[in-house]
Image: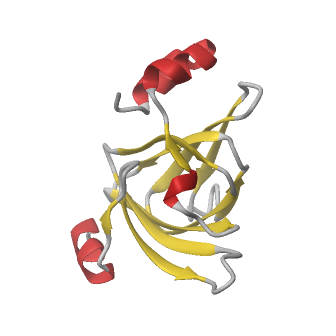
């Protein structure tokens, strides 16, 4: 299976942070929402933050590395993987943390699901500005440069 087949069959669209997505559910009371998210190798999901917690669930393909900077400027790295040597299928990014992700491996893509509680709305989404984020966390200048587009 290729990324192109998955994108086509699941009707995924480009996401503003990078990658491809499709919203699959939002409950009527806006308590949570979920998406499918596909990230291509040699691309990335740029640093961004949202006001809610976001649970990532690994489904298929390569490993996903989540790069996260917390409120105090502490860096955390989490690898989601179905590889039996290092299996980790879920992770929750805390509300307000800056985070980016990348896909690494030989399949050329990673497919995951993201669930946001309460439900995600784009007006609560903030894409990082490279200069502003670097000024906030100069100790992570190289990481920020790598995972921002402007």
Q: How many marks?
A: 0
Q: Nearer the viewer, residue 80 or 136?
A: 136
Q: Quadrant of residue 27?
A: bottom right
Looking at the image, can residue 26 be seen?
yes
Colour style of the rendered protein structure: secondary structure
Query: Considering the image in quadrants, where does the C terminus appear?
Result: top left
What residue do we see at 34% from left, 32% from top? Answer: 149
Q: Nearer the viewer, residue 77 or 51?
A: 51
Q: Is residue 63 left or right of residue 93?
A: left
Q: Residue furthest right?
A: 72
Looking at the image, can residue 1 be seen?
no
What residue do we see at 22% from left, 69% from top? Answer: 4
* Residue 81 image position (x, y, % from top left): 57, 59
Q: Nearer the viewer, residue 149 or 40?
A: 149
* Residue 145 image position (x, y, % from top left): 43, 23
* Residue 58 image position (x, y, % from top left): 56, 66
What residue do we see at 44% from left, 65% from top? Answer: 37
94 up-or-down from 117: above or below: above
What residue do we see at 41% from left, 32% from top? Answer: 148
Q: Residue furthest front?
A: 123
* Residue 89 image position (x, y, % from top left): 64, 65
30 up-or-down from 127: above or below: below
Q: Is residue 99 left or right of residue 13?
A: right
Q: Quadrant of residue 115?
A: bottom right
Query: Considering the image in quadrants, where does the N terminus appear?
Result: bottom left
Q: Residue furthest bottom?
A: 28
């Amino acid at each position: 299976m290729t990324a192109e087949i998955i994108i086509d069959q699941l009707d995924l669209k480009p996401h503003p942070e990078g990658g491809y997505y499709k919203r699959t559910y939002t409950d009527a009371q806006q308590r949570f929402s979920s998406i499918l998210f596909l990230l291509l190798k040699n691309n990335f999901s740029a640093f961004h933050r949202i006001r809610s917690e976001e649970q990532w669930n690994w489904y298929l393909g390569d490993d996903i590395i989540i790069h996260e900077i917390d409120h105090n400027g502490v860096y955390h790295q989490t690898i989601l993987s179905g590889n039996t040597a290092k299996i980790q299928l879920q992770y929750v990014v805390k509300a307000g943390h800056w985070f980016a992700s990348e896909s690494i491996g030989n399949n050329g893509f990673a497919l995951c699901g993201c669930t946001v509680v309460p439900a995600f709305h784009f007006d609560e989404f903030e894409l990082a500005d490279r200069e502003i984020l670097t000024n906030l966390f100069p100790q992570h200048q190289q990481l920020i440069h790598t995972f921002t587009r402007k």
